[in-house]
Amino acid sequence: MSALHEDKGCPLVSVIIPTYNNAHVLPRAIRSVLAQTYSNWELIVVDDGSSDNTAEVMGQFEDPRIRYIRHDNPGMGPGAARNTGLRLAQGDYVAFLDSDDEWLPEKLEAQLGVFKRASERVGVVYCGVLRVYDGTGFRRTHIPRVRGMALQDALALEVGCTPSTTMVRRAYLSQVGLFDESLMTGEDLDMWLRLARVCYFDFTEHVLVIKHEMDKESSRSRVQRVVADRERLWRKHGLLSLGRTLTGRQYALLGHTLIFEGSRTGALYLLKAIMAVPWKAWLWGFLMLSIVSPALYRRTVLRLKQLLNA
């Protein structure tokens, strides 16, 4: 059991919100921090050079616990924005929140409770998340199930352990270093994989985050970046040398991501997944569906997820 060292002159928790051209939803995220039942926090909003009215929106919030930082060079990426926040953070714990997501009021209090009961070796606590697919009416709840520190455990975290669900001991963040700013996507998974080598993960089963997902069609350059970043992650962590099952999982997850980005390239990675684990019959069905229509694939997958959560 570890004690929480409260210092009235210093926040215990540093909340970091990276944002880029999200002025229309940023107030929702900030209000969800202001509504927390635990109040000894600081909020660092890092604007990655937005061209919208983010600065004007931030002027609406006068709480002294909130700081607004703006990057001079636009579009440096979410990793760079989180790193700016980390360099300024004063708390012993860091909680990340994406600017288009929101927390339920008990989020910080519940995660600090887990840390208080846990060993000092626990460095990350995450929570349940409700994924709301805006514009579709679909909702999906993900309840945490994975504790531990093995690399395979960290890979299993990818579906439910998003930045908005996590709270991390800053001491372990100092140990593994900052987010990889060369990754414009997948920088969070890279961080979890590095943390899994030095500390344990724990969770609270409560759903304390609402993650808003948008059904979007991505540009060719965006798709190329997603592929390049993921393949770089595979090489960096040796993720394709952990056996056929995990290799197939990595290919299938990338294929799924690309199809949800609106790219038919995802079918190629589903095929690679099948070559790794040909006995997974469901992959064959998803491959055929992705070839016929990526849009139909997305609707079908969302419907299946909704039924599984029913």
Image: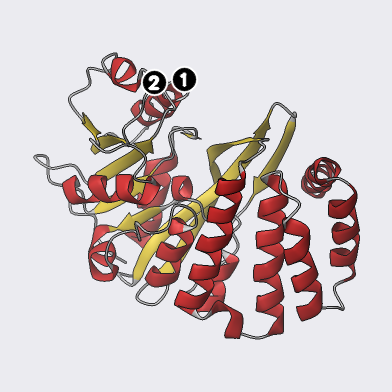
Residue under the image location 29 percent in, 36 percent down: 46
* Amino acid at dot 2: Asp
Comparing 31 with 50, the one in front is 50
Question: In this figure, which colouring scheme has been used for the structure?
Answer: secondary structure
Circle 1 sits in a helix, a strand or a loop, which is it?
loop
* Amino acid at dot 1: His
Q: Can residue 90 be seen here?
A: no
Q: Can residue 222 be seen here?
A: yes
Residue 133 position, x and y percent, is: 67, 34
Q: Quadrant of residue 116?
A: bottom left
Residue 22 position, x and y percent, is: 44, 27
* Mark 1 or 2, nearer chain start: 1
Q: Residues within 10 Å of mark 1 (few under 14, many from 20)?
A: few
Q: In which quarter of the image is the C terminus?
A: top right
Q: Mark 2 points at which residue?
A: 52
Q: Taking 97 as reference, is 128 left or right? A: right
Q: Is label 1 or label 2 in front? A: 2
Q: Do the residues labelled 1 and 2 touch (CB within 8 Å)?
A: yes
The residue at the far left in this view is 9
Q: Taking 145 as reference, is 65 left or right? A: left
